[in-house]
Image (spheres, helix red, strand yellow):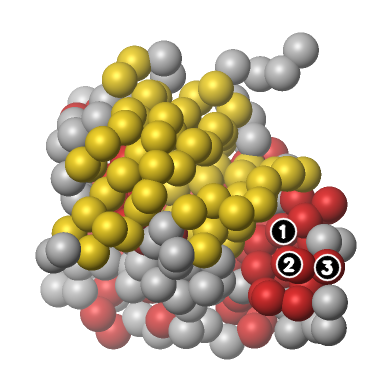
Amino acid sequence: MAAAALLELDKLEVAYGGIHAVKGIDLIVRQGELVCLIGANGAGKTTTLKGITGLQPVSAGKVVYDGNDVTGNPAFQLVRKGLSMVPEGRGVFGALTIEENLAMGAYARRDRDGIRNDVERVFSLFPRLKERRRQTAGTLSGGEQQMLAIARAMMSRPRLLLLDEPSMGLAPLMVQKVFETILTIAKEGVTILLVEQNAKLALEVSDRGYVMESGEITLAGRAAELLHDPKVRAAYLGEAA
């Protein structure tokens, strides 16, 4: 039997500034899955995540999380319900130290011992952050900031983690490290929705995938099948159809 849907988008539409950016999409992420949403820049991927997390108003359709309609719920409420996002551009607090950024990720929690244990857990995932724990986030490299953004999200103990373009602007070695960590987090039982322009890498690590073009889902299926789909290879992997 298939696992229960943890996230379900039902005919979701998001518009802003006269632009109809997301045009009635259906999408499911089941408990324990790593699902990717791929597409070209401007396809509507980030806007979809903003619609899910209440950062952009939904104009039609529903966002269902853990069986409950959470359409339009503000982000701080969703974090308390176990849904966290790592935004495009990382969004770390540059004037705060690594430790202080991690504390911000745990702001909704009161279990001090658990928080302390989770700090050590994310430091084991990202040893570089442990070495620089008292360094201000603004002085870190792009890759280190991406690590910190993921670590900060993990401090809320998410059931569902949304990742928006985690490879953007990173050197190849750092991209590899970040994606290894994403796989580790997924294997630990965290459900993940990954938005990523690097289609090949996203499909290689995911269970299932959705392809988005001009605000619409045009293809969906097992990631391994999409990776070998001629249309996907031609459009996103730079290969002849």
212 left or right of 34 in image? left
Under tag 2, what secondary structure?
Answer: helix
Q: Quadrant of residue 109?
A: top left
Badge 2 local density, few (<14 within 10 Å), some, or many (20+)?
many
Name which residue lies at 40% across and 35% down.
11
- Tell me the tag on residue 203: 1
Amino acid at circle 2: Val
Q: Position of residue 6 (x, y in %)?
A: 50, 25
Name which residue lies at 68% across and 76% down.
235
Mark 2 to mark 3 CA distance (whole Å): 5 Å
Q: Position of residue 101 (x, y in %)?
A: 25, 58
Give yes or no for contact between labels 2 and 3 (Cβ–Cβ under 8 Å).
Answer: yes
- Residue 103 visible in the current orientation: no
Q: Quadrant of residue 191?
A: top right
Return the residue nearer the eye: 129 or 17. Answer: 17
Give yes or no for contact between labels 1 and 2 (Cβ–Cβ under 8 Å).
Answer: yes
Mark 1 to mark 3 CA distance (whole Å): 14 Å
Q: Establish if 232 lies above or below 105.
A: below
Mark 1 to mark 2 CA distance (whole Å): 10 Å
Looking at the image, is mark 1 or mark 2 nearer the viewer? 2
Residue underneath mark 2:
232
Amino acid at circle 3: Pro
- Tell me the tag on residue 230: 3
Q: Establish if 196 lies above or below 120.
A: below
Quarter holding the N terminus?
top right
In this rendering, the count of numbered labels is 3
Q: Which numbered disc flags the more N-terminal residue, 1 or 2?
A: 1
Under tag 1, what secondary structure?
Answer: helix
Return the residue nearer the eye: 130 or 13. Answer: 13
